[in-house]
Amino acid sequence: MPSLLSPRFEDALIYATRLHATQTRKGSGVPYISHLLAVAGLVLEAGGGEDHAIAALLHDAAEDQGGLATLAAIRARFGDAVADIVAACSDTFEEPKPPWHARKRAYLEHLRDAPPAVRLVSCADKLHNARAIAADYRRHGDALWQRFNAGPDDILWYYRELSAIFNAQGPEHLAAELALVVAELHATTTR
């Protein structure tokens, strides 16, 4: 039976909420913390432990809110295991960010050799993002794609590649669900 979450998780939740307080989901106005909570929930439901759930809450912190300085703060506050997952789930610490295609290709290559803990958090992140894209596409149609730095063909390519990696290497349950969402996205957007 999984252990209950300790005060470290609560601390991470407060920390993530403060770091992302002014951030919203692209084009929706929804507070960004909703994404972090959903990813942490998916990680816990897939059998992840507290370090995995904390990393899920913080997976975008360094990339979006302070780079390597934030990663160092995460390492000091939550330990190496959490910080290593956060670092591995980030596609860049540079500001401004490098071009979209270069970042995504590098992330895919990195993910092929990533440890299971990184794939767990990353797959939960990508699953939640894909679900949000699919739901927003049903609501807004092709206007949705204006939110992104890449076009629909590129985004669909990226999610198909992610799905293939996760289906080959796990986590099995989340990978299977991601494959279903990616198939739905492909079917609805390529009609």
Image (spheres, helix red, strand yellow):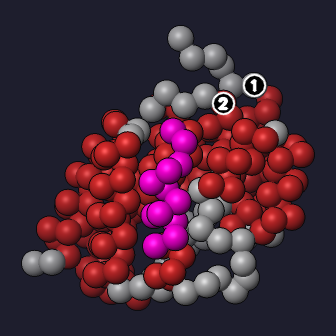
Up/down of 91 relative to 165, above or below: below
- The residue wearing badge 2 is 50
State the CA–CA distance, disc 2 to disc 1: 8 Å
Q: Which residues are magenta?
A: 105-116
Relative to the observer, which residue lies in front, 116 or 41? Answer: 116
- On the picture, is 182 further left or further right than 188? right
Identify residue type, mark 2.
Glu
| Residue 139 visible in the displayed image | no
Tell me the residue at 89%/46% (across/down).
76
Relative to the observer, which residue lies in front, 103 or 96? Answer: 103
- On the picture, is 173 further left or further right than 28? left
Q: How many marks?
A: 2
- On the picture, is 97 further left or further right than 187? right
- The residue mark sitting in front, 2 or 1, is 2
- Label 2: few (<14), some (14–19) or many (≥20) C-alpha neighbours in 10 Å: many
Secondary structure beneath label 2:
helix
Identify residue type, mark 1.
Ser
Q: Position of residue 1 (x, y in %)?
A: 53, 11
Secondary structure beneath label 1:
loop
Tell me the residue at 42%/85% (across/down).
150
Up/down of 145 relative to 130, above or below: below
Query: Which of the 4 image quadrants contains residue 50?
Result: top right
Circles 2 and 1 in contact, beta carbons < 8 Å: yes
Q: Position of residue 119 (x, y in %)?
A: 49, 46
**Nearest to N terminus: mark 2 or mark 1:** 1
Decide whether the magenta segment is chiefly helix, strand or loop: helix
Q: Which mark is residue 48?
A: none
- The residue wearing badge 1 is 6
* The C terminus lies in quadrant: bottom left
Relative to the observer, which residue lies in front, 134 or 183? Answer: 183
